[in-house]
Amino acid sequence: NVEAYGLTGQLARVRASGVPVLALETDPDAAATRVIDEIAAAAREDAVQSVVLGCGGMVDIPRRAAGRTPVRIIDGVAAAARFAAMLA
């Protein structure tokens, strides 16, 4: 919960790409294109500098988006794993 963690002031808004989770496996090219399009819309409409992906199945999105958007893309699962390792 964004509010519970005190991050409300850091959030432009929550956006959904409309990509079903299974599509990330069954049609990865179309799914990645849709997610990257939504990231581009966030940059254009909300002037965001970073996007945190909300699904473990999106692990390939940062690589696919390289050079296609100026937005920093954060894989939430990788970030959480690195943070947990830091705390260990």
Image (cartoon, grey):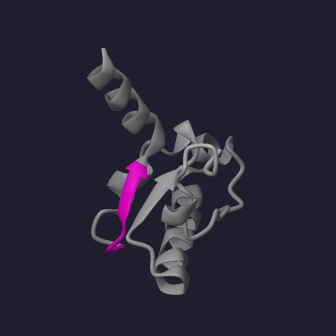
Name the spot of residue 80 as percent of width and height, x first. 42, 32
Vertical relation: 38 (above or below) 83? below
Q: Nearer the viewer, residue 29 or 11?
A: 11
For the point 54% across and 79% down, which residue is it? 41
Q: Quadrant of the C terminus?
A: top left
Place of residue 61 in the rendered image (x, y in percent of width and height, measured from the top left): 43, 53
Q: Is residue 71 magenta?
A: yes
The magenta segment is 69-74
* Image x and y of residue 67, in percent: 28, 70
Residue 72 image point, x, y percent = 34, 62
Residue 34's image quarter?
bottom right
Task: Pick out the residue farthest to the top.
Answer: 88
Identify which residue, 87 or 61, lies in the foreground. 87
Taking the spot 52% from the left edge, 58% from the top edge, the residue there is: 32
Q: Residue drawn at (71%, 61%), measured in percent from left and top?
A: 18
Query: Does 83 appear in magenta?
Result: no
Residue most extreme to the bottom: 44
Q: Quadrant of the N terminus?
A: top right
Indicate left or right for 43 with 68 as reference.
right
Q: Vertical placement of 17 versus 61: above or below?
A: below
Measuring 46% from the left and 78% from the top, which residue is drawn there?
A: 43
